[in-house]
Image: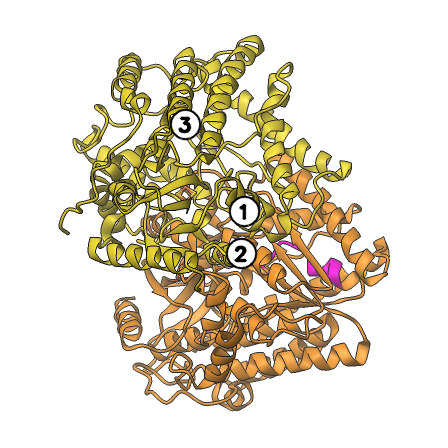
Amino acid sequence: MKKFDGSCGSRCDKARERGKTSAETGGSVAVAPENTAQQLEAEVRRFKEQSGRPVIGYLCCFAPPEIIAAAGAIPFRILGRSGEDNSAADAYVEPYGCTYVRNILSRAANGNLDFMDGLVISHSCDMVQRLYGIWTYYHPFDYSYLFNVPHQVSPPSQRFFKRELAFFQESLEKFTGVEVTDGKLRRAIEAYNRNRSLVRELYRLREPGVRPGKGPGIKGSEVLELLMAGGALPEDHYYLLLESALADYRNRSKNGGTEDVDDQTEVGAEESRPASQGGLSGEPTGGSRRPRVLVWGSIIDDPAFYRMIENAGADVVADDTCVGFRTWDQDVPLADDLYEGLKDHYLLNFQCPRTDRGPGTARFDYILQRARAYEVDGVIGYTISFCDPHKFDYPDLRDYLKAEGLPMLLIDDNYSFEPSGAIETRLQAFIEML
Amino acid sequence: MSKSEMSRAKRHLETTAKMKEMLPRFFMRMIERRFSNEPLAWCMVGVPPELLKAFDLLFEWPENFGTMCASRLVAPRFIEVAEGDGYSPELCSYVTNTMGYCKLQKETGEAPPESPLPGGMGNPTMLLGSGFICEPRWKWFQSIATRFIDIPVYSSDPLAPPWDIDPKDPRIEDHYLTLMREDLANQIEFIEKHTGRKLDLNLLREILERSHEALGYWRDTLALRKAVPSPMGSTDYFHAIIPQMYLVGDEEAVVFYREMYEEVKDRVEQGIGVVEDEKYRLIWFGLPPWFNMGVFNYLESLGAVFAYESTYNVGDYFEVDLSDPLEAIVKRTWQRAVKMHEFGAETMPELCNPAVFGGFSGSSLLEELVEDFKLNGAVLHLTRSCRAVSFGEVHTKNRLAKLGVPGLIFESDMADPRMWSDAQIKTRLHAFLETIDAKKRGGN
Ligand code: SF4
Ligand code: SF4
């Protein structure tokens, strides 16, 4: 596998040296997700070695991993390492860019993603599509594909999307030498759908009425940790993980406590700061129910932010983010024409603000429905630097929710997820108000 | 914020000076018609102006309105209103300029008095968007119609193949052209519905003929800037694009660009340059700082002239068969994308949007430009709020370095002057010109 072409030279080395000791990394919370992500990557490396199958990294939710799997490769959803030093990216891209994208490029430049044999990026937002060109220029992969996605859901756009699926599949077949038959693709979709239904079970543990008078059966931060594994582990491994996690959490629900499973699910350092309200476990105190919130926004691939909310006294019971429920809430329809189902799922049903669903607020109805179903008291938005799709939608969404009686708080952050006094104060003030 | 000494710009050509009368004439005609409540479309670059002319549809370009607000220094007012409404300062300042404007208009029921045009942008009856260039375009009109003016929107969705997909593969060509054709047909159907007018293809063809004639003069004018000394600089360049938005397809535009061509040709023949002692020949990347266009004159005072600008460059892409005017519109967009592939698309940051506005950066086109225009430096304007055009400039700078051309990236914005500092810019420009000097002397 070829390395970056070296034009960043000593600068990269310096960045590499600085690596984790950088002031930007700091903070005890950053340690936990890093370990999780590291463990997941180690798992992928091991699986790659055992199976001899190539690892194809992908970003965003438009190019179906089902096709990658059916073509005999290991789909690996590339997540960032929030809070890491991104300076290795400076040799290739400007500072004014989505911090998640810069983080990924910097990780690639530092050789941290060198277990990937291929790269698939979908044209979701401007930042991501440019990442493709620049990344593959400095670092050609054995296989790379930019999956082009229309912004509309009109009939011509839908036809384009379906045809793009075919081109994508063809390119994968050429690379892996494995023909994607209808049967293989169907089986891959079924396996993914099976996982989707288990994830929905996990979400259900936080539905109202599951544990009357008590907090949710699983914390938002715990759900997110499990979801992050979903992009990294092979489908069947993930299925086993979800099954055992579900059993644990159901048990916890039955036994009435959350503490007993905390030890198994919290990875790495425990929070050092005291919780402002209630207990760390999410149990309500004095019979009053903790506020329930839905989190909306840009990529959140680090449970630290949810922990901040939990520590500030609320329960994250639902979300609308790209690694979160957006990915899992519906099955891929198993139509006779499998592409029709993939198109419906990935273009029409997948709710990312980069897709134009026309003017008006109907485009937010699904968020409201989710908020109602989970009896949410407020919505916390999280946007990262230079994330156009989400930042543009915020004022419309805020006003829409307000009109429906749901308050919204926006946290605009730098993809650091580090507890900062300013963010915590705002979270606490908002939660107190709920 | 003290006023920059660069806020006023001097143009060099007599032809562009004429715009002072030509544009107000056009705007007056337009404003009169607006008063009679005719349909009015707010549009985005990517919507063919010829199509609007063929429908005899009144139109306005919020992005161009943004440049006007920026150069009259009223954009900050509108942008601050938008920020107060929850729009992040990171977002495209043309968009936030529009959002602030719309909010004020909605609150008061009339065009904000700060508007550079009397009556502002008028009261639109439809929005014609296009994802031709960037992401913010998808949210811009969607939000206007959601928050401020409840009118129908059509956003066209043209795509182009990424760098490593061969556009000459007939299946790929069909994949993309089919989308563009269907999209254009839908756009026309939408305009027909909301104007109650029928598209006249013969008229469209005639308009395209005139527009391509004008654009041909424009392209030839730009090629004349290969001459040493360069006969035309950036202040003329950036102003001369405005008739392309409003007048292209009219005989007036043909005359304008022909006269411009003749004037520039004359200057070449007589050896008249923008600067007397031309020491530095530069290429400009990105959108200009519309509020401080005098920065170009400042550089000229130091012997530096821009012979080429990466943005708003039409290239040869309009050389298409006009017998089927709809196919011609599709093909000129497509040809632009194909051409970029031919120039060595492997080095392009992206190519999913057919405008590839900032994207030709790394291709062999760069080599060609450096040689043909005898360039010895590049200034890359990193516009904080427009990443669509500026994200990729570090990459371009890397590529230029390989060609021995030093580049300066400086940070500011196209409409929002808040990041600008005269002193800082001057220091950086001076240091940069010294780098070029050192390079000329054989150093690094
Ligand atoms: S966080 Fe926003 S800008 Fe970044 S990749 Fe995701 S959608 Fe794009
Ligand atoms: S290209 Fe840049 S300036 Fe133009 S609309 Fe897009 S983001 Fe704004």
Q: Confirm whether circles 3 and 1 share one chain.
A: yes
For the residues labelled 3 and 1, say whether their Cβ atoms are less than 8 Å apart. no
Between discs 1 and 2, the one toward the N terminus? 1
Determine whether, in the image, residue B310 is placed left or right of residue B158: left
Determine whether, in the image, residue A89 is placed left or right of residue A310: right
For the residues labelled 1 and 2, say whether their Cβ atoms are less than 8 Å apart. yes
Under mark 3, the amino acid is Val
Instruction: From this view, report whether residue B148 is shown above or below residue A373.
Output: above
Find the magenta span and give its range.
Answer: A60-68
Residue A217 appears in view? no
**Residue at the spot 52% in from the left edge and 20% down from the top edge:** B212
Q: Quarter of the image for the C terminus of chain B: give it.
A: bottom left
Name the residue nearer the viewer: A293 or B27.
B27
Letter of the chain shown yellow in the rendering: B
**Residue at the spot 58% in from the left edge and 30% down from the top edge:** B317
| Ligand 2 contact, mark 1 (Cβ < 8 Å) | no
Q: Chain of mark 3?
A: B
Between discs 3 and 2, the one toward the N terminus? 3
* Element carrying mark 2: helix
Residue B67: % across, % down: 31, 36
Residue matched to label 1: B366
Q: Which mark is residue B399?
A: 2
Q: Which mark is residue A205?
A: none
Residue A115: % across, % down: 68, 75
Under mark 1, the amino acid is Leu
Letter of the chain shown orange in the rendering: A
* Element carrying mark 1: helix
Between discs 3 and 1, the one toward the N terminus? 3
Residue B235 found in image quarter: top left
